[in-house]
């Protein structure tokens, strides 16, 4: 209590970042409301996405205060335990009966009032654990054992989340890990080798999925393959298909491309200034599928209703947070703070870039939420905690 | 600035990463600009394309009225029952859940069950509603599914054209049924059935691509719209049809209607006031029809003072209403009957039909001879019962139907003596080659009466001729050769051809309308009038200037006939009807001084057979019978022309028909005088 008062008196809060945070939450709240505006005619108000989202914001802010106040060194002390905890949860979620299945993937725990997605928290725990692990003298960064251990720490959650399946979320672990290792001083030749090897793997997976005959495909599920086909604008029907098969493939292709096509139309038709809050026909008339408009595709709603100016505002807010994060990393007093900040910035950046890039067809469709804007308890809580940790590093990095 | 802190930072990895993040954000910005600003309009079009359906709204067609504002073609209200499928969605859902009964199903089975549930709900409703309206109907499965998949945003027509009793029952019993509603649409109707079929024309459903006003989108759907095909409906289709409007319907992702917006209201078409008199038209049709059930013929009643067409009949006709309500099998057979050929407008000769005038052409011959001073009306010519002149024309002779004896002009006219008229065409002074003079005079006067030409020229820049007519055939003044014969040979004129022409045979075909113009010209002292069918075109626009257009009376040619010529002709024509030995006496009506002339023309009709050895086409002779007349002689008000194909003779077939028409006119005149003030007001 005493420390809280101390900090408040000093008011060493990063107001710019805090403002960006509030701005994003205002965007999130209003457009989660807009995305499901017809819902309120049939369902009780308190059960709506909007109020749930507000509830998550409040809970998240409370947690954030906690994560600001407690020194990150003390938090890092728990990092290893937290890491293995989340690994355990990721294993548990895979067990039928414990993990909940939605849209064909087993990613959630059902807590009765809400669903919890452990992979969101696993990312945070992983950042803390890796930051803690890489906080060692520079010389050790040259040791292959350390590097391999670090890669191993990255690979465990990656494999578990891949099993759910959630390819998008699992792939996020690698950029985070690589960025942290890069900043920690792992020589580029190691990272280059690793990056080269993984590029070969990724290339093989893509080519395998796109061009190999059906019996020879090994790596991806049919659904993931379809997403790749959509991303590369490939015909679903194999070249030697019969007319009936071709027709079926065409229908499937229409269905699979529907979401992304409608999202693209939503964004594009927003124009410079947008159509006004609650006025987007794509959203209101249900062309943008209602099941995803409020979470993975919330950016479509914002872009349609606020246009280029609104989209730019969102990008600007994220840029403020990302740059603030980089500033935190640059000014961090110690290695731990710097690595934590870089990990968190990479995490947020990956989410923002992949999600918005997906709307612009720069990225394939994945179930990665937009931090703080997309509806979803786990995502909101982990994002708020992540940003709180950035504030924490600033605060506790400069008091000495 | 906080951005530059890390850019200036000595920590190179941090700098690299910051630049990388900024570059990625820039990439997103550029792409957002490309999508939202550069290509924004394309995407907006795509968005509207998928969510907006444009529906064309037809305008109310203008009415066609007769000279006393009686409707000849109008619009009635048709009551249809429509079903709004979007309002039935809750019913679809509950029925679907009932059918499913908690079973587990594959996606495909679910779709099938959904289809079935929808069909059952709609089909039950249809049965329920139609039973209550006393006209049970079964909804076809295919019909429903087609509508559901293609035009879900539109209401579905359940029943069309309710009777007034059914409308009352609907309002009383059905209005509570969900999703079912009564709509009112204007529909073309012809209150007098098949009256003036050829003049009014008919409509056909129009499925042509967009016509009318430009719209910033293409129509996905047209409400039933009709296009005029024949007669006035066809000629003045653009005026009558008005301007179609348009509305857009916004649909959601599963094609249900969510809102509507009217872009442009339809503008109703122009009204037309005709010169036709409905009652005279009806009387003329009845009079012609009384000749027999399969009469093929025409009647034209014209006002010789103005050229107003009071009636224009062509039989057999057809009911224009059937083109909208649909035909029975028997009616299709009627329409395809080649012998009766209902499509021909025999009064105007549209479709290229024209007839030899026969003796009624003696009107023109008489005018020609009298005006040229060729004959002395009192001088008698001996008719031996045939025409023959061994000295001048050894190869030509013709039997006369008139009995032998001495003929002056009036007697020759009323007994229709061919000998008398041929005499003046070929041998007035008994000199050789006088037939060339006869040819010159006849061709000159025939052209002055505008034979061989359409009677109506364009009314104004925007109004084409209201009648579709044929021009018949009449040689030009300097004509050298006759029409080609069946072997394609061109042969020059001979005396016999001139003899034939002066009695209305050979190198001449006319239409009843042309004959009405000719008769009127004789009646009114030489003014060749343009027949007037449309008197006025009225815009029904509520705002702005009324764009009414009155069609003026038009004299196409003034013959400036001598008074003596006119008086003598009137006298002769009067004698033709009034005298006991006149050929037109069957047209007599007590108290009406009718002037007339009968005609019986011979027409060669191909039998469809050929001579077995020479392969020459074989012909049989058919009679075209005529009666041209006007009345009353003191101040001519009506010119009546009757033509019947395959009649017996002008005297026995056509004169009685004209008599019936005059009787009806006289009756009407008396009636109207009685109810005078009421009619005068209109």
Image: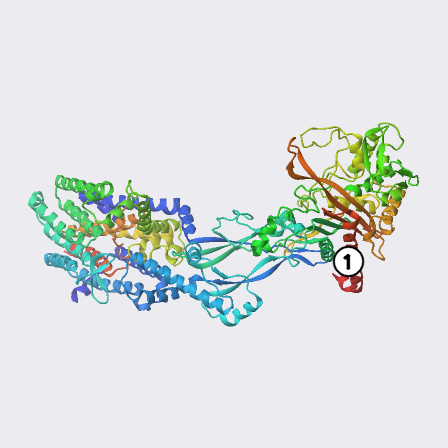
Q: Position of residue A344 (x, y in %)?
A: 20, 52
| Residue at the farthest front position | B613
**For the residue labelled by badge 1, is the local secondary structure a helix, a strand or a loop?**
helix
A322 vs B287, left or right, is left
Quarter of the image for the C terminus of chain B: give it. bottom right
Label 1 resides on the chain identified as B
Q: Position of residue B16 (x, y in %)?
A: 21, 42
Above-or-below relation of A258 to B367? below
> In the rendered image, which residue does mark 1 sit on?
B664
Kindly indicate the quadrant of the structure image that contains residue B384.
Answer: top right
B546 vs A289, left or right, is right
Above-or-below relation of B178 to A262? below
| Other-residue count near label 1 (Cα within 10 Å), few / some / many at <14 / 14–19 / ≥20 | some
Above-or-below relation of B531 to B672? above
| Residue at the farthest bottom position | B172
B90 vs A134, left or right, is right
Residue at the image point whose x is 81% and y is 36% from the top? B398
Q: Nearer the viewer, residue A108 or B465?
A: B465
Residue at the image point whose x is 48% and y is 63% from the top? B137
Q: Position of residue B429 (x, y in %)?
A: 90, 31
Q: Nearer the viewer, residue A273 or B120?
A: B120
């Amino acid at each position: 209590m005493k420390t809280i008062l101390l900090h408040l008196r000093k008011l060493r809060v990063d107001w710019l970042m805090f403002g960006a945070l509030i701005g994003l939450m205002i965007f999130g709240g209003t457009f989660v409301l807009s995305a499901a505006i017809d819902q309120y005619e049939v369902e009780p108000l308190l059960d709506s996405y909007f109020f749930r989202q507000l509830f998550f914001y409040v809970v998240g802010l409370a947690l954030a205060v906690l994560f600001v106040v407690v020194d990150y060194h003390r938090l890092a002390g728990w990092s290893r335990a937290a890491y293995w905890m989340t690994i355990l949860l990721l294993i548990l979620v895979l067990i039928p009966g414990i993990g909940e299945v939605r849209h064909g993937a087993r990613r959630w725990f059902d807590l009765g009032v809400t669903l919890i997605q452990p992979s969101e928290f696993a990312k945070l725990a992983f950042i803390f654990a890796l930051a803690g692990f890489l906080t060692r003298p520079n010389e050790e960064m040259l040791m292959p054992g350390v590097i391999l251990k670090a890669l191993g720490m990255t690979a465990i959650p990656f494999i578990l989340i891949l099993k759910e399946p959630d390819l998008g979320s699992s792939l996020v672990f690698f950029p985070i890990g690589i960025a942290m290792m890069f900043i920690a001083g792992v020589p580029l030749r190691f990272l280059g080798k690793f990056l080269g090897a993984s590029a070969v793997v990724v290339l093989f997976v893509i080519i395998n999925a796109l061009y190999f005959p059906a019996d020879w495909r090994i790596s991806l599920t049919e659904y993931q393959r379809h997403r790749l086909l959509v991303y590369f604008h490939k015909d679903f029907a194999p070249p030697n298909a019969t007319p009936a098969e071709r027709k079926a493939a065409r229908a499937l292709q229409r269905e699979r491309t529907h979401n992304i096509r409608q999202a693209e139309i939503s964004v594009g038709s927003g124009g410079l200034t947008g159509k006004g809050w609650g006025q987007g026909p794509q959203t209101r008339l249900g062309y943008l599928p209602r099941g995803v408009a409020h979470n993975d595709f919330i950016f479509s709603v914002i872009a349609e209703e606020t246009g280029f100016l609104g989209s730019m505002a969102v990008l600007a807010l994220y840029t403020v947070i990302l740059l603030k994060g980089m500033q935190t990393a640059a000014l961090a007093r110690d290695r731990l703070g710097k690595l934590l900040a870089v990990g968190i910035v990479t995490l947020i950046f990956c989410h923002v870039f992949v999600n918005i890039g997906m709307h612009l067809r720069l990225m394939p469709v994945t179930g990665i939420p937009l931090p703080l804007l997309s509806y979803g308890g786990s995502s909101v809580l982990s994002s708020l905690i992540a940003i709180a940790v950035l504030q924490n590093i600033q605060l506790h990095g400069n008091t000495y | 600035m906080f951005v530059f802190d890390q850019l200036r930072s000595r920590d190179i990895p941090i700098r690299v990463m910051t630049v990388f993040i900024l570059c990625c954000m820039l990439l997103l910005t550029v792409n957002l600009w490309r999508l939202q600003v550069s290509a924004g309009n394309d995407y907006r079009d795509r968005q509207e394309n998928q969510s907006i359906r444009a529906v064309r709204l037809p305008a109310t067609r203008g009415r066609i009225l007769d000279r006393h504002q009686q409707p000849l073609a109008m619009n009635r209200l048709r009551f249809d029952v429509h079903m709004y499928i979007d309002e039935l969605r809750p019913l679809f859902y509950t029925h679907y859940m009932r059918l499913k009964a908690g079973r587990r199903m594959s996606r495909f089975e679910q779709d099938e069950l959904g289809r079935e549930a929808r069909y059952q709900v709609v089909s039950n409703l249809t049965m329920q509603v139609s039973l209550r309206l006393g006209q049970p109907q079964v909804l076809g499965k295919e019909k429903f599914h087609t509508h559901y998949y293609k035009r879900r945003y539109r209401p579905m027509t359940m029943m069309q054209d309710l009777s007034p009793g059914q409308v009352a029952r609907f309002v009383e019993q059905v209005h509570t049924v969900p999703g079912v509603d009564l709509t009112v649409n204007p529909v073309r109707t012809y209150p007098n059935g098949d009256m003036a079929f050829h003049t009014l024309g008919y409509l056909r459903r129009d499925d042509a691509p967009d016509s009318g006003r430009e719209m910033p989108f293409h129509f996905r759907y047209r409400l039933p719209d009709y296009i005029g095909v024949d007669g006035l409906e066809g000629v003045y289709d653009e005026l009558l049809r008005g301007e179609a409007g348009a509305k857009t319907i916004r649909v959601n992702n599963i094609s249900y209607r969510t809102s509507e917006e009217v872009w442009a209201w339809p503008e109703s078409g122009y009204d037309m006031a005709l010169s036709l008199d409905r009652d005279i038209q009806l009387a003329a049709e009845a009079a012609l029809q009384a000749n027999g059930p399969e009469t093929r013929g025409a009647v034209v009643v014209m006002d010789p003072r103005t050229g107003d067409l009071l009636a224009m009949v062509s039989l057999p006709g057809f009911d224009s209403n059937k083109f909208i309500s649909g035909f029975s099998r028997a009616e299709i057979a009627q329409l395809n009957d080649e012998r009766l050929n209902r499509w021909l407008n025999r009064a105007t000769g549209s479709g290229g039909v024209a007839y030899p005038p026969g003796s009624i052409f003696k009107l023109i011959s008489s005018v020609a001879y009298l005006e040229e001073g060729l004959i002395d009306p009192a001088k008698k010519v001996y008719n031996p019962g045939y025409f023959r002149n061994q000295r001048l024309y050894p190869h030509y002779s013709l039997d006369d139907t008139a009995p032998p004896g001495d003929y002056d002009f009036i007697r020759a006219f009323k007994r229709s003596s061919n000998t008398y008229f041929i005499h003046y065409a070929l041998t007035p002074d008994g000199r050789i080659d006088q037939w060339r003079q006869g040819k010159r005079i006849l061709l000159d006067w025939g052209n002055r009466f505008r034979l061989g030409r359409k009677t109506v020229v364009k009314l104004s820049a925007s109004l084409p001729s209201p009648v579709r007519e044929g021009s018949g055939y009449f040689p030009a003044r300097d004509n050298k050769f006759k029409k080609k014969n069946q072997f394609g040979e061109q042969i020059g004129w001979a005396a016999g051809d001139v003899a034939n022409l002066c009695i209305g045979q050979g190198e001449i075909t006319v239409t009843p309308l042309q004959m009405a113009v000719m008769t009127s010209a004789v009646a009114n002292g030489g003014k060749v009038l343009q027949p007037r069918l449309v008197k006025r075109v009225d815009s029904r626009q509520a705002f702005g200037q009324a764009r009414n257009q009155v069609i003026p009376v038009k004299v196409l040619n003034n013959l400036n006939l001598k008074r003596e010529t006119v008086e003598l002709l009137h006298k002769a024509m009067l004698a033709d009807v009034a005298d006991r030995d006149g050929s037109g006496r069957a047209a007599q009506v007590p108290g009406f001084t009718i002037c007339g002339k009968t005609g019986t023309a011979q027409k060669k009709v191909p039998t469809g057979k050929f001579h077995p050895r020479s392969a020459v086409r074989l012909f049989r002779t058919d009679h075209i019978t005529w009666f041209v007349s006007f009345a009353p002689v003191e101040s001519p008000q009506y010119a009546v022309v009757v033509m019947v194909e395959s009649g017996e003779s002008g005297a026995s077939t056509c004169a009685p028909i004209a008599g019936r028409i005059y009787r009806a006119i006289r009756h009407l005149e008396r009636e109207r005088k009685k109810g005078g003030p009421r009619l005068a007001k209109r």
